[in-house]
Amino acid sequence: MRTVFCGLTTIDLIQHVAHIPGENQKVTSEEALLDVGGPAANAARTAGALGAQPTLTSPIGTGVFGKLAAQWLADSGVAVVDLATEGDPAISSVTIDSAGNRTVVSTNNTGRAHGYPAADVLDGATALLVDGHLLDVQIALARTAEGANIPVVLDGGSYKPGIESLLPHVTHAVLSADFHFPTTAPEPDAVTELATVAAYGVPFVARTNGSGALEALVDQKYYRLPIEAVPPEEIADTLGAGDVLHGAFTSALGAGHDAMASLASAAQLATMSVRHAGALGWVEELAQLYDATEQ
């Protein structure tokens, strides 16, 4: 099973603090970590942890941070198709407080020059994920996947200008509560947002709501999927939970599983992830669960 992920890769400087600093305030970090990040990259790393043979198509670069990112991705079992010829990935500054809440500042590679993947990048692929951060490449890949009957998953973390041209080629859109079209009300209800995306021809549209229930519109039928509520004292880190969900969902679709069942299992894994620090802190617990099941 081979899965392809296309989009943003970052280098994340993650600082754990007692509380998020206010204006003109300094705080002392309790722990600092440098790691690879970005929605497409973290989703690919999740797929690697689940054995889905991921390939990441992204501008990474040959600079110091680019080499670090490439090595960390390889360590996670991710094959890389680098669309950059020089430079470094976008840099993100992440601050996480004692309750697991985070703030993120990132350049998102806006305006960075990039190349295009070879025509055979989707050969043998069983699913494609796109995150809206590399629209020209993603539209071309999604069209190719559409013609080959490969599921195309959109990680809709937020609205990106021009994403309307990508949506007609998407089969499964999983949005966050922060995704809003600029032409709709500032905070439309979930059904309206789901229906707006579905109107572009997307047969499966779902939306996450933090710790609240997931909602989905599947072939014009509305579903509500409750998820486990994690007690606040058990939350270590919410960073990357959405990426884990998208990576797990794409992996399950690529394995041929039903979309709603895939969403439910992906939500369980995302819930597990917030109990652990880092984008892949949950991997050890998952391995222990598999070992216990096999015994």
Image (cartoon, grey):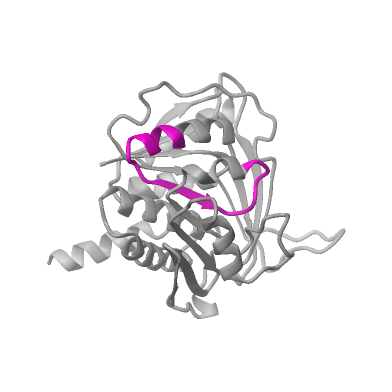
In which quadrant of the rendered view does residue 45 lie? top left
Q: Quadrant of the C terminus?
A: bottom left
Residue found farthest to the left: 295
Q: Relative to residue 22, is residue 113 drawn left or right?
A: left
Residue found farthest to the top: 85
Residue 232 vertical position relative to residue 171 in the rendered view, above or below: below
Q: Relative to residue 110, is residue 50 drawn left or right?
A: left
161 or 176, nearer to the observer: 161
Which residue is at a point 67% across and 68% down the rendered structure image? 188
Give residue 209's position: percent from left, percent from top: 55, 69
Can you see residue 240?
no
Q: Quadrant of the N terminus?
A: top left
Give residue 109's position: percent from left, percent from top: 65, 35
Q: How many marks?
A: 0
Give residue 160's position: percent from left, percent from top: 65, 46
137 or 245, nearer to the observer: 137
Magenta residues (range): 142-162
Residue 18 vertical position relative to residue 140 in the rendered view, above or below: below
Residue 255 forms part of the magenta stretch: no
Which residue is at a point 38% across and 27% down the rendered structure image? 121
Residue 158 forms part of the magenta stretch: yes
Which residue is at a point 45% across and 33% down the rendered structure image? 141
Q: Relative to residue 207, is residue 203 drawn left or right?
A: left
Which residue is at a point 69% across and 35% down the rendered structure image? 110
In which quadrant of the rendered view does residue 114 lie? top right
Can you see residue 23?
yes
Q: Relative to residue 169, is residue 54 drawn left or right?
A: left
